[in-house]
Every structure is written in structure tokens, then in C-alpha cells.
Image (cartoon, rainbow, N blue to C red):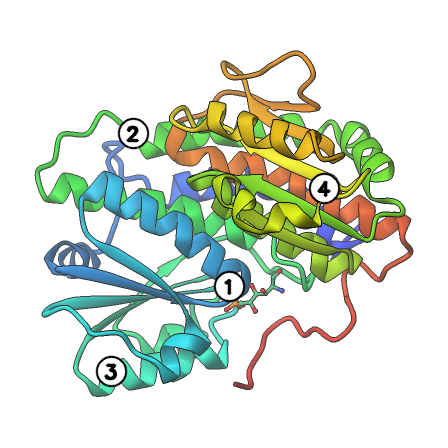
Amino acid sequence: EKGTYPHYMLKEIDEQPFVIRNIITKYKDEDDSIKLDEEVRQAVQSADRIYIIAAGTSYHAGLVGKELLEKIANIPVETHIASEFLYNMPLLSKKPLFIFISQSGETADSRGVLVNVKKLGHQTLTITNVPGSTLSREAEYTLHTYAGPEIAVASTKAYTAQMAVLAILAVDTARASGLEMDFDPLQELGIVANAMEIFTEQKDVLEEVARDYLSVSRNCFFIGRSMDYHVCMEGALKLKEISYIQAEGFAGGELKHGTIALIEEGTPVIGLATQEKVHLNLRGNMKEVVARGAYPCMISMEGFQEDDDKIVMPKVHDYLTPLVSVIPMQLISYYAALHRGCDVDKPRNLAKSVTVE
Ligand code: M6R
């Protein structure tokens, strides 16, 4: 039930710090190590390549998952849109593992891929919020995201939960493979949960940003680089689906290759800069759009912030910034939709789970 909340989406956004703390508890063993099924550990560790298959927001979590598994566990990963993979399968490696990410566990496009790769004899693991779901029952292994029921069509807490589980899985795999690891995901996720609360407790600031930037805009761009780029894609999807503002997430460096032509006087551009390697490059990209009239809103992180950044998130580990930086985007989308009189929890033309191809 949504209790005193006006919308499920807002309630689910607010639940995220608790979801992350719940995940920490569920994946922690008595000796503070990671608790994971030995079979799952084996399956991931023995794969020569991982194929992540998902749709929508879960696909965006999969893009971050690729970064985490490659950087932390040193396994090559490809992330694919389920509906594309279904009819256009790339050449596979010798010992692939397929990871399906799905909040509902019922997405038909992903199920189509699951059925096909099972026929080929490949190993399958589903990361889902609904353990009894079709994708969970039909895959060999399941990891539970423990986010609790997600009712709003716009996915929020399922996304952050998926990324948390992927980070844990990546570190567990790295440790099982004997890789040196100074990143403790269970501890770092605790810091993330606290950082999330800073935003869920400061909604007035984000409501103001939504009012200021998005009350009358026709479109909006989200730009970032590396992990921030993936979060920008998610921020844009959130804004599109509930506020019907045309929004796109772009890689900051790619703008000058075409998209920058769309920038006009007053076009809102939300920039995200949390990654040490590229935050200065992104600031350069923001200058380029501002010079063409864009109305900029910078989201940065403590340590990399500059004076006129609109939103500064608390410092969290480089690998986990998406879990926190997405929250202002979720809230900005929520308030933009609200101000524009949209049906936040049930946007037009959409269903919570897409059980047709
Ligand atoms: O249940 P799933 O995670 O498989 O659903 C995938 C997408 O349909 C879903 O994430 C969709 O994009 C959301 N409406 C996004 O907010």
C-alpha cells in the first residue's frame, strides 16, 4: 500500500536506502563475507564471457553491470537489448553465461532469449525481484534483488537493487578467482544507502529544479561519460515515460558529432559528472552546449564539485555512483510529471510488465 504517499513512485524512490540495507543483510554471511550459492559462484567464475540480456531500465542496470563485472572480476561482458538479441544473435564465446536482469521476471523479449539459449545448452542466471517468476523458474540459477513489490510503472528501486546485486556478484567472482580486492561492496553499499537519504530528504530542491527546468520544455538532454552516461540513459527514460518530455541520454563526447545541432536558446541540459577519469571532459562538453544557449544543470559529486553546480551528491565509491546519482534524476522526473499534470504511476501507453514480444 502507498500509505500517506500520493504515488507509488515516490514511495518506491524513498524506499531505496532501505532496499540497499536489506540487500546488504541478505548477502552477508556470519563472518561478514559475501553469502552466495556455491553453484552460482561456480557458474559465473567459470564463464569465459557473460551476456547480459534485459530491457528498458533493467537494460540500463545491465550496462552498469558490464562495467562492474569487467573492472572488478575481469570477465568480458556484453550487454544486449533482449528484443534485438532475440533475432540477431552475435557470435558466442565457447563458454558463455547468460544473465537475465528483470524486475518482473516476466518480460517476453528476455524469455524468448532464455528459451533459445537453453536449447543451445548454455548456462543461465536470472537476477530478479520476483523469484517465483517465469524467468526465475526457467533459468538454472536465480539471484534475488529483495526490493519488495514495485508497483509504479516507472522502475526506480528495482534498478538500484539490480546494480547493488551486480556489484556484490562482481566482487564475489573476483574473490573466488583470487583477484586482489580492496573494494568491500557490503561496506560501500552502506555508505551508498546513507548518501541516497540526502536526496530523499531534500525533495524541495529537486522539485524546484523540475519546476525551473522542465515546466514548459519540449525536450531535455542528459549528458555524461562512462558510467555517468549509462545513468543519463536511465534518467532520460524516466523523464520520457512519465512526463512525456522528449529526453535523450548522450555520451558527452558524442554530442559534437551531430546531436549538438538540437541545442537552442533555453534547452535544458542535465550534466552528470561523478567519474574521476572523465568529469573534467564532461565539464568541457557542458561549456560547448552552454555556448549554444543551453540551460545547464550540473550534477556532480563531492570532491569534484564546482561553485555553480546545482546538485552535489555525497562521495561514494567510483563503482557505485549510479546508485546515488540516479536518485535526483528520478525525483526530477517525478516532479516534472506532477507539474505537467501527468498520471505518474500509470503513464499512457505503458504496462508494468511487458509480456508480449
Ligand atoms: O520487468 P523488467 O525489468 O524485465 O522490465 C523491463 C522494462 O519493461 C522496464 O524496465 C521498463 O523499461 C520500465 N517501465 C522503466 O521504468
The quadrant where ligand 1 appears is: bottom right
Comparing marks 2 and 3, which lies closer to the viewer? 3
The answer for how far apart the CA atoms under marks 2 and 4 are is 29 Å
- The tag earlier along the polypeptide, 2 or 3, is 3
- The tag earlier along the polypeptide, 2 or 4, is 2
The answer for how far apart the CA atoms under marks 3 and 4 are is 39 Å
Q: Is residue 333 left or right of residue 35?
A: right
Depth check: give the residue in front, 231 or 177. Answer: 231
> Can you see residue 5?
no
Comparing marks 2 and 4, which lies closer to the viewer? 4
Q: Amino acid at mark 4?
A: Leu
Residue at which label 1 appears: 103
* Mark 1 beta carbon near ligand 1 (under 8 Å): yes
Q: Amino acid at mark 3?
A: Lys
Residue 347: x %, y % from top left: 77, 66
Q: Is residue 205 left or right of residue 311?
A: right
Q: Secondary structure at mark 4?
A: helix
Tags 2 and 4 touching, CB below 8 Å: no
Residue under the point 70% across and 73% down:
350
> Can you see residue 336?
yes
Residue at which label 2 appears: 184
The answer for how far apart the CA atoms under marks 1 and 4 are is 20 Å
